Image (spheres, helix red, strand yellow):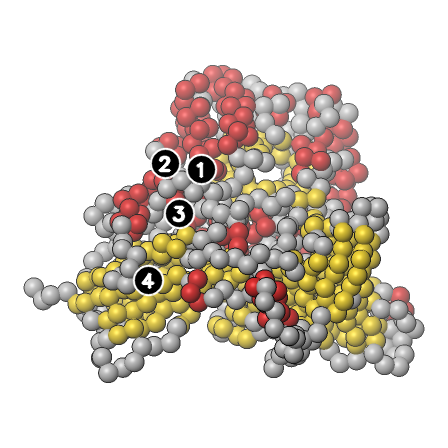
Amino acid sequence: MALTGDGDKLSLRGEDGEDHNVGAQTDTSDSSRLESCLDQPMDSSGVHEVVKYVPSPLPAKHYDADTTEPISCGLQSLEELLSWKQSEANPFNVAAVPLAPREPPLARCLRRTLVSHDMMGGYLDDRFAQGTMAEAPYAFYHWQYIDIFNYFTHNMVTIPPAVWTNAAHKHGVVVLGTFITEWTDGAAACEVFLKEEESYRSVADKLVQLSHYYGFDGWLINIENSLSEVAVKNAPLFLRYLTDQLHERVPGGLVLWYDSVLDNGKLLWQNELNQSNRVFFDACDGFFTNYNWTEQNLEWMRDYSGIQGRQADVYVGVDVFARGKVVGGMLETNKALEIIQKHGFSTAIFAPGWVYETLNDKTEFRENQDKFWALLSDYLYVHRPASPLPFISSFCQGFGKAIYWRGKREANRGWFNLSAQETQPLYYHTELEDQGWLSSRGCPEDAWNGGCSLLLDGLIPAAHASPVCAKILSLHVPLASKTLVTLIYKPSTGIKVSLEMKTTDARLCTHMDVQDVKPSSGSPAVRDEGLQLVSQFTQLCGNPSPDGWTVGCSQLELRGCALREVCLRIQRDGPPQDTPFSCRVGEIMLLDVDLQVSTELVQGLCLYDVVWLRGAGTSPESPSPCLHLNATLRWKYLTELARHFRVYWRRLRGPDPRISPGELVLVGRAYSNLFRVTELAVPEPPCLLELVVEPVSKKGLPVPENHWGRRSLSYTAALAQ
């Protein structure tokens, strides 16, 4: 491993009972259902159920009517917004990942990039809070290029699905919902809520509550209808109150205004910030212009005194669909970004899902997406997510053709769940000297964990004697005095692979030592529990797995260093000749050698909201003979310690007592302390089964089974009437 220095709680937001109350079956409020859960005894008696086929008591807007899968949705009207209560909210749409710090911080960025995700009405595959089976879903993974992600639909109140918030927050990207009014109904709603201080404060308070409860960071306000004299006078006051309240409740929160209404109440898109709409800009955090601007608009804005040093807060809109008279768009979107960069403004890229919606072959989505963002990359800077140790990423993009676990296929089906997305690498294609080249891309054909690996391929020309350096990650990770680095990879023949790590300012960082770590199976016994665990982990180091993966390990001794870049050095292993190569990177992990061993247990595992189905119906006469269990599991565990949770079930006893207990069978992965078991085929009653929750540690070390959570469920058939 080469090392150079070149100068220069994961927790659900609102752990306060009510915020996470989830639905007893006589009272369908979340608080009463959770109280029923918490009343369950924690001893071996478990939970008993009588199998009855009754309609699901779960609210249809939060749970799929056929499967009881938890789903995300928006709010349709002012009445629905004003009547919203935390006790009736959707606990499964609460983001499990807080906004990660980043370098540079957003406030220090002179130019920013916003993506507004508008696709086919919204709430598609992404509405399934625990993911879904999908052969060719849309996903976004070029987070290093953007600063703000806005989920846009034409619901009055668009609440971002938690899967998007989780993925964005891992990369230090702010997430905004959308509050939109439009057409005649929108104008009527504005006259109601902007008529006086009490009414606009009530709406603003609800928007702040939604953002705080669901764990996203703010709002794009889009008033696309004309306003009366009273309403337009109150609109900036509404904006200022909303912005102030959001800043108080949501650290790092933002409120942006879309270029639409003027200060006289007319609906007239300006395609610039000017004196007619400045009053809205002054009342919030930023201004998102309409898309039909010309370079003259940007020249005028650059000299406009009303900006007053807030040039970065003006987001110039770019419609990727190129609707109307616009600059660039589609595969010429880079032309718009070039002009925006020239004049020093921020950018708002609207509907980049164009690459998915219009380019026909969905199986080539990754290739098309990578090409599109490569076009823009020269006009976007890369920000670096900041992370403490341990750091781990398998480069999973949150979707794939199969699900992998430690190099083996765990499920053979297409899937989508952005909560499973891990810290993303850099994707690119680079031409080298003498007709050589290097490419970095996600590949779903094989993986170590999740849905894809990082595939580096290219050509080392015969004249190229030095190694090819493939940049993988740009990030900010303060390193420990002793840091264990592991790289899991699968190289082609004819090359040698090593890891290169670049650190921050050499004046503050001292490189003490670098050692390769060999397999520790022959090492003397280690008494310290922490070192025992590291020793156990490093037994894999240097040994290829049966599936062809190699685990390379090094221990770094450093002082005052922070990791800035991770590169893979690829060198020809043979005589000078044109050498095509590939190297699949499955995972990289950085671990503090002096880690403290966690004694955290999964506690308080309870089961509630049980719904029995037979096949696809709710009647015993359904043609399918299979009994399906649907239930919610909830537990306590420090989520900052867990990469995710693996949920299992097994039969303990019945209906035939001569059959021995079954093996643990994986049900799925959970990315918070909440999981909905859906359509689980179980034995006929009477039966006793067990549900088990295994935390997967961020430290890469197995969690002992006596730390897992377990809950038994016995059930019997209903007595004949």
Determine which residue is flagged by label 3. 91
> Mark 2 is on which residue type?
Trp
Q: Residues within 10 Å of mark 4 (few under 14, many from 20)?
A: many
Q: Residue at x 89, y 81 (%)?
A: 575
The answer to whether marks 2 and 4 mark residues whose Cβ atoms lie closer than 8 Å is no
Nearer to us of marks 2 and 3 is 3
Asked whether the viewer can see residue 377, the reply is no
CA neighbours of label 1 inside 10 A, class few (<14), some (14 to 19), many (20+): many
Disc 4 vs disc 3: which is toward the camera? 4
Q: Which mark, residue 711? A: 4
Residue at horizontal 32%, vertical 70%? 681
Tag 3 secondary structure: helix
- Residue 84, numbered circle: 2
Mark 2 or mark 4, which is nearer to you?
4
Label whose residue precedes the other's in the sequence (4 or 3): 3
- Dot 2 or dot 3: first in sequence order is 2
Badges 2 and 1: C-beta atoms under 8 Å apart?
Answer: yes
Q: Of callouts 4 and 1, which one flags the residue occurring earlier in the amino acid sequence?
A: 1
Residue type at tag 4: Arg
Which residue: 90% across, 72% down? 465
User: Would you call the spot at circle 2 few (<14 residues within 10 Å), some (14-19), or many (20 or more)?
Assistant: some
Near-viewer residue (32 or 400): 32
Q: Does residue 273 show up?
A: yes
> Which of these two is toward me, 206 or 708?
708
Expressed as whole percent of the image width and height from the top left, the position of residue 348 reads: 65, 40
Work out how far the residue at label 2 is from the one at label 4, CA to CA, in angstroms: 33 Å
| Distance of label 2 from label 1 (alpha carbons) | 9 Å
